[in-house]
Structures are given as C-alpha cells and as structure tokens.
Image (cartoon, grey):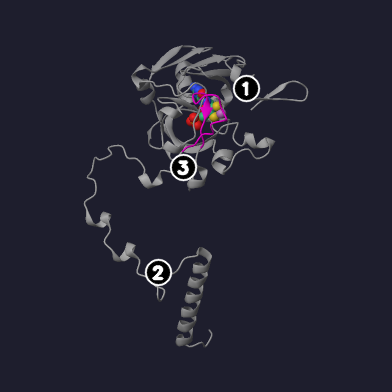
Amino acid sequence: MSDTSSADILSRRKFLGAASLAGAGVALGAKPAMAEGAKPDPLITEVQDWNRYLGDGVQKTPYGVPSKFEKNVIRRDVSWLTASPESSVNFTPLHELDGIITPSGLCFERHHSGVAEINPADHRLMINGLVDKPLVFTMDDIKRMPRVNKIHFLECAANSGMEWRGAQLNGCQFTHGMVHNVMYTGVTLKTVLDEAGLKPNAKWLMLEGADAAAMNRSLPVEKALNDCLLAFGMNGEALRPEQGYPLRAVIPGWEGNLWVKWIRRIEAGDQPWQTREETSKYTDLLADGRSRKH
Ligand SMILES: Nc1nc2c(c(=O)[nH]1)N[C@H]1C(S)=C(S)[C@@H](COP(=O)(O)O)O[C@H]1N2
Ligand SMILES: [Mo]
C-alpha cells in the first residue's frame, strides 16, 4: 500500500483526466463541448424538429429499409470492368461494415445473365442421372425437409484478381469486395440426394441454374455429401433475388462460381462434365499445358 493521501489521488485523477481530454481534443481536432469560452451548441440547446414533431407511425415501411442518412453504404460497380450490367459484378462495401455478418442488401452480386425472376410456386428442382429414383421437388417439398442454419462466407474467384497487374481500383470495396458472409437456412444436399439414392458409380454431380446463362458446374459427390446445402433463406429472411431466390447451392470454402443460384437441376454422373465454367473460365493454365480448376 502506498501512503498517498486520498486528496493526492483525487487531484492526480483530475490532472490525468484533463490531460487525456486535451489529448483527445488534439487528436480529433475537437473542442470539448464545455470548454471555457465555447459557444453553446445549438444541437444541444435548441429543440430540434425530431424532438418537436411526431415521427412516422408504424407501417410506414412494412419491410424496413436503412436510414436515408446511410445512403453511402451501398454496393457499387465499376463501369469499365464489364461490357454489360447483366453479366457483371458489384462489390460489398467492406469499409462500412463491422462484425461478421454481411447485411443481405449489401452482399455483392455476380451474375452471368442477370437476376432470374422466379415465382417459387413455379420453381422445380430435378435430380436425375445415376440415381435410383429420379425426382422433381417443388419448393414446398424442400421446405418440408429437416432444415439447418449455417454461416458461410462466399468469395468469387476473381476477388482481388484485378490487382495482379498492380493497383487498378481505388478502395477495398473494389479490390476485395467480392465476398460476403451470411447465415443460410436450407436443407443439406445429402438430405435431397438420399431421397433419390445415388448409384454406387455416381462420383460427380452437375449443378445447373435456371437463369438465362443456365450456369452449371461439376461438384464431387464426396464434397456434396460432406457439407453442402441447398439454401432458401439468408440472414433470417428469404434468399434475395440477387442471391438466387428461391434456391441456391452453398458449397462451403469453395469458389463462389460453384454456388449455383436459382438451382433447378442436379445430375449425378461418374465423371466431371467439363462445362464452360470449368474449362474456358475459372481455371488456371499450368506450365505443362494442363489446367487447374479452382
Ligand atoms: N445460376 C447462376 N449461379 C451463379 C452465378 C450465375 O451467374 N448464375 N454466378 C456465380 C458466381 S461467379 C459467383 S462469384 C457467385 C456469386 O454469388 P452472389 O451473387 O450471391 O454474390 O454466384 C455463382 N452462382
Ligand atoms: Mo465468381
């Protein structure tokens, strides 16, 4: 125990408090509001409109939207990057976000043929190929299956790729914004595949989208049975149209291109399909002339 008197401690605290306040003032270029000689702050001394008049009642926005003062917190694209907005990408505003969950409305979008608009009542998921029982599911069928909620990040293979030639874009939204992390609600791919029954020689699946690109990719059965999902929900609400409403594939840890949106068909086969998206696109040429999928 030191024998410092309580009066000493108090005055030292006062001194330290004043010093740190001054430090903060210098660092932020701000004057403490109560500094001597300061003008009264009308934001404190005057009654403001929001304090004087009634605000909007309930039901002004039955599905809520962010405050108008947050209008800079948006996805952005780069006009010169792609020839058309339908086959393009926009970017998540990473610099405006905290924590681990990306708000649904801010998840970057990557489409090869624009956003397919699908009434869930008209959506069908077909399972065919090397299965015991080819099946077609409606969304109602899928929603009756045991569901799971899982948080996964998705990253486009092109994320940061533009920078390989040196800085091209200004700001982390554009250099690294092809990523999002949300909670998905859906059924495991295993649940759906078990219904159809994979034949023993089924080693690969082809996932196909219902958009105008009919985007498709081959997925090893081993991965599909391990941790993949078919998601209809995201962050507690329905999947957004941009993210593949009413149903998308979730392929944890693998490049975004495999996460087929608006998924309408899964075909089981004994080898990969070598689709356009895994031959002319989304591959690296190796020195020996072969290619590596990623
Ligand atoms: N049907 C379909 N699925 C698709 C695409 C597409 O154009 N059509 N784009 C893929 C690509 S390249 C990526 S990176 C992710 C992007 O998902 P997001 O739009 O939810 O961010 O979706 C993938 N799934
Ligand atoms: Mo992608």
Q: Position of residue 286 (x, y in %)?
A: 74, 25
Seen at 50% across and 77% down, the residue is 16
Q: Name the residue beneath numbered marker 3.
A: 101
Name which quarter of the figure residue 68 lies in: top left
- Label 1 amino acid? Lys
> Relative to 104, is 207 on the left or the right?
right
Q: Name the residue beneath numbered marker 2.
A: 33
Q: Are marks 1 and 3 in contact (CB under 8 Å)?
A: no
Q: Name the residue beneath numbered marker 1.
A: 281
The answer to whether residue 241 shows anywhere in this view is yes
Q: Identify whether 233 is placed above or below 30.
A: above
Q: CA distance from mark 2 to mark 1?
A: 59 Å
Q: Earlier in the sequence, mark 3 or mark 2?
A: 2
- Label 3 amino acid? Ile
Quadrant location of the C terminus? top right
Q: CA distance from mark 1 to mark 3?
A: 29 Å
Query: Circle 2 sits in a helix, a strand or a loop, which is it?
Result: loop
- Label 2 amino acid? Ala
Q: CA distance from mark 3 to mark 2?
A: 36 Å
> Relative to 59, is 276 on the left or the right?
right
